Image: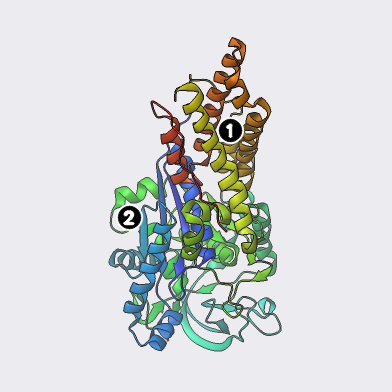
Amino acid sequence: MPKRVPLLLTTPIYYANGAPHVGSAYTTIAADVIARAWKQQNRKVFLLTGTDEHGQKVADTAAKAGVTPQAFVDTQAKAFQHVFQQLNVGFDRFIRTTEADHVVGVKDFLNKLKAATTPLGRPAVYQGEYKGLYCQGCERFLTEKELVDGRCPLHNTVPQELVEHNWFFRLTDYLPKLKKALTSNSLRILPSAARQEVLGYFTQGIQDFSISRENVKWGIPLPWDKTQTAYVWVDALPNYLTGVGYGKNARQYRQWWRGEVVHFMARDILKFHTIYWPALLMAIGEPVPATMFAHGYFTIDGRKMSKSLGNVIDPVDLIGKYGVDGTRYLLLTPFPFGQDGDLPVQRFIEKFNADLANGLGNLLSRTTNMVEQYCGGVVKSVDAPKPLTKAEQQTLAYDFTGSLVTTWKAIAWANQAIDRAKPWALAKSTKPADAKKLALLLAQLVAQLLEISHALTPYLPVTSATMTKALRAKKIVKAPPLFQRVV
């Protein structure tokens, strides 16, 4: 087997203007699942997440709260870290764009960009005037085609008409090279619908873009022009480099960025990641990421998530009701990762009780109870009747729902095997054949549960560890309930 290169997995850095919610939790849990799955394959993995803390929107929100921007983002960053820790996300670094090493790295990145020459022999960065419609919610200029009834489709606000003198990145000179990377799949966009959307940008027309703002003070000044502040996206995207040592620890940086890089994101920031970011990397001579995975949009009980509807969900509230692993399971199972879908929160109790408390939990409880009662807590080692190699492969292929369906089929098989064999009746029999049948059945059930536990490790890490400990004990005893039913 060829030697696997180190794997860098990233989430977007979440905008510190708002509180954590199920959207940010969803993306981050997904990245954590992949990180844990690859670690099970003995691969070196680095998981990077964090907060995006600069920009006018943050400064305005801080002013309304009566605090400095730095004090505001300090509080927000702690909130995101707390939620991700509560969700048992095993991140290797939580980066903040106000941290000193990030600021140093961004300035180095900008200086390299300023010194770069495009494939057509022109400066990669130039001065110009920009006149356009700016959405402060998106922190970007919008075209007329992108508006819906004259409003930003994401924020339902009328954009401002702005005229600014900025520094621009000559993106158009990199488009042929970028399109070649996309069409050859050396830059892989997943799922296929997202890839088609990205290729569609080229038919719509892609223009050079501003890398600075002249009237925004809360940000990183351009190293060569202190009257300008780095555009928030040009400040934010290099976190994927600075988070692993760019500008500070060259050896660490080379280890991770020159390995395999996979970016996770929601589809609303697809263009920044798949067009702007790779082109910027090409300009400074850095390799582009191997894969970008953009998951879809989701509704809550059939309605768009919004503060006005009162259906913005705090992940900590879900944890309080369903536990950490229950929350992870409920967020990842309603629809395939990568597609648009609906989080049926009103049916979470029903699914939690059916799948976790009654399905998985009941299987472990009844199996360990029978092993203790009928076999003195000891069973022989046998192969699992239903190997779950397919479930592991589905996880690594980002098919989370498929993997969990495969695993739950094995859980259903085991529960049905118990009901069919009636081990309690076999235990009362005096026939040697029935005793052997009972011993084999219980050994197979233990082996199957260990297989299930292994397959569930990326999704339900605490539950999986609990199961494995109970099943690998020298003497197995009845396990306490994995999940308490929710009413």
Q: Is residue 272 above or below residue 72?
A: above
Residue 270 at x, y percent in the picture: 58, 63
In this image, 18 relative to 440: left or right?
A: left
Q: According to the image, label 2 marks what residue?
A: 245
Q: Quadrant of residue 7?
A: top left
* Residue closest to the eye, 148 or 394: 394
In this image, 140 relative to 47: left or right?
A: right
Residue 78 at x, y percent in the picture: 35, 68
Q: Is residue 380 above or below residue 330?
A: above
Q: Quadrant of residue 201?
A: bottom right
Label 2's element? loop
Q: According to the image, label 1 marks what residue?
A: 388
In this image, 434 relative to 464: left or right?
A: right
Q: Is residue 427 above or below residue 305?
A: above
Q: Distance from label 2 to label 1 (Cα)?
A: 38 Å
Residue 277 at x, y percent in the picture: 50, 62
* Residue closest to the eye, 234 or 306: 306
